[in-house]
Amino acid sequence: MENSYRAKRLLIYVFLVLLTILSILPFWVVLVNATRSAEQIQQGLSLWPGGNLQYNWSVLMGRGFNVFNGFKNSFLIAAGATVLNVYFSALTAYGVIAYEFRGKKVLFAVILGLIMIPQQISMIGFYQFMNRLGLLNNFLPLILPAIASPATVFFLKQYLETIYHPDLADSARLDGAGEIKIFHRIMLPLMKPGLATMAIFSFVTSWNNFLMPLILINDTEKYTLPMLVQLLKTDVYRTEFGSMYLGISLSIIPLLLIYLFLSKYIVGGVTAGGIKG
């Protein structure tokens, strides 16, 4: 019996290791190709880094790829959108869970309906609206709409249903705490795993957003990293694949760092939920 248990456990570990390798492999290939020459890349796949990193970097800089400016622009947009998204979505989800009011079910149905509407449908109208407000070539149209994120509201509302208890808020009210203080001091700490999860998705979505910034921004000084990557056009006689991979690598490294920083909160939340269950 014990040998059978060990064999099953070993198979599970082997399976998990294989899944981990398959998940990491595409990122590793991109990073490796960023250090190889165009000729080496064309010869086939390799898992070992090359020695062409410095050359690829010089080619990248020669094509107007201002990586530091791109990092700054992408981070300002992604960080601002993520903070607004997570905070106001948490505030809305808490209001839907904690309070009883007329039209509550209708409001939640509207939120669900908004999730099903593709963003591309509203792009033309949104562009015309921003044009009338004089906000073209500006970061605000890429940040402020994150306040209204129905998908994040839905997720946090479902998450709150598993951890919220009215006695927590009632006890705080008896102690004289106001509603805003209850939300900030009690509810936000309880929602930390859920907030971390949605912060990752929000940051990644905003960081990788290409189409909407391309429509709204014309000044190359305000280009985000994904927009700068599309500037890496090929030459007539030679395609510098190495510099292209290097540009892509620079754009995904911050996402990996954000995930590594916030993943511990997600794991902690799953563990806490299992203990409560």
Image (cartoon, grey):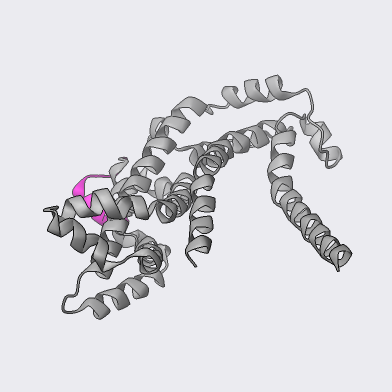
Q: Quadrant of residue 74?
A: top left
Q: Is residue 65 left or right of residue 29?
A: left
> Number of marks in the image?
0
Q: Which residues are magenta?
A: 127-137
Which is nearer the eye, 50 or 211? 50
Q: Is residue 133 magenta?
A: yes
**What residue is drawn where x is 38% and y is 41%?**
79
The spot of residue 50 in percent (x, y) is 79, 27
Q: Is residue 173 left or right of residue 147?
A: left
**What residue is drawn where x is 45% and y is 38%?**
224
The spot of residue 53 in percent (x, y) is 71, 24
Q: Is residue 234 magenta?
A: no
**What residue is drawn where x is 53% and y is 26%?**
64
Which is nearer the eye, 215 or 163? 163
Q: Quadrant of residue 153?
A: bottom left
Residue 152 visible in rendering = yes
Q: Is residue 271 left or right of residue 124?
A: right
- Residue 175 to residue 27: above or below: below
Give the dominant element type of the magenta stretch: helix, strand or loop.
helix
| On-image quarter of the N terminus | bottom right
The spot of residue 242 in percent (x, y) is 71, 32
Residue 147 visible in rendering = no
- Residue 232 to residue 262: above or below: above
Which is nearer the eye, 260 or 46? 260
